[in-house]
Amino acid sequence: MIPTLLSKPKNVFLIDALGAFTTSFLLYFVLKSFNEYIGMPEMYYPWLSLIALLFCVYSAMNYFLFNGQHWKKRLKIISMANFSYCALTLALMVFHYSSFTLLGICYFTGEIFIVGTLAYMEWRMTKTKS
């Protein structure tokens, strides 16, 4: 089912929007509330959440306003943004490693893996001929 969803550019924008919304919600409302079990410095939650929310809006707009034109350029933009988000998250993990708990390391490593995989799939989709 997932390969079928990812075969259409319009659907990729929807998946990206839903994932970014989920990330934004989890960061701001869940992880921030249970930070003692995560260890990320609290000042970063609103910023990471806002970034994810902006990605959500961008991808949702591309999904709802999709007309088949310039989709590769738009998909490349969100792919690069997602890779940048992964790099930022990894940098924060490395810089503040001593404050992270095992649960925090597992959560953010998983998030980087999922977002990075999606970004890679988006990037590969922009390299197709159609």
Image: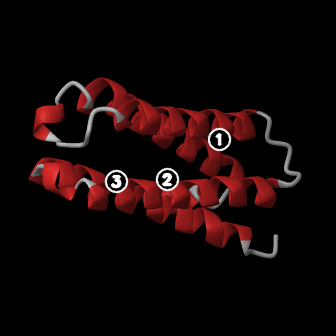
Q: Which residue is mark 1?
A: 59
In whole angstroms, how far apart are the C-alphas of marks 3 and 1?
Answer: 25 Å
Q: Quadrant of residue 63?
A: top right
Q: Quadrant of residue 26?
A: top left
Q: Position of residue 5 (x, y in %)?
A: 57, 53
Mark 2 vs mark 1: give the one in front: 2
**Which secondary structure, mark 3?**
helix
Q: Residue furthest right?
A: 69
Q: Position of residue 113 (x, y in %)?
A: 36, 62
**Which secondary structure, mark 1?**
helix
Q: Amino acid at mark 2?
A: Tyr
The residue lying at 28 percent from left, 33 percent from top is 42
Going from the N terminus, do you reach mark 3 or mark 2 first?
A: 2
Q: Which residue is mark 2?
A: 85
Q: Amino acid at mark 1?
A: Ser
Q: Are marks 2 and 1 in contact (CB under 8 Å)?
A: no
In whole angstroms, how far apart are the C-alphas of marks 3 and 2?
Answer: 11 Å
Going from the N terminus, do you reach mark 2 or mark 1 first?
A: 1
User: Toward the viewer: 11 or 117?
Assistant: 117
Residue 123 shows in this picture: yes
Q: Dot 3: few (<14), some (14–19), or many (≥20) neighbours within 10 Å?
A: some
Q: How many marks?
A: 3
Q: In the rendering, which numbered label is found on residue 92?
A: 3
User: Toward the viewer: 123 or 97?
Assistant: 97
Q: Dot 2: few (<14), some (14–19), or many (≥20) neighbours within 10 Å?
A: some
Q: Position of residue 14 (x, y in %)?
A: 60, 41
- Residue 94 sits above or below residue 44 on the image: below
Q: Amino acid at mark 3?
A: Leu
Position of residue 102 in the picture relative to residue 115 (left or right): left
- Residue 74 sits above or below residue 35 on the image: below
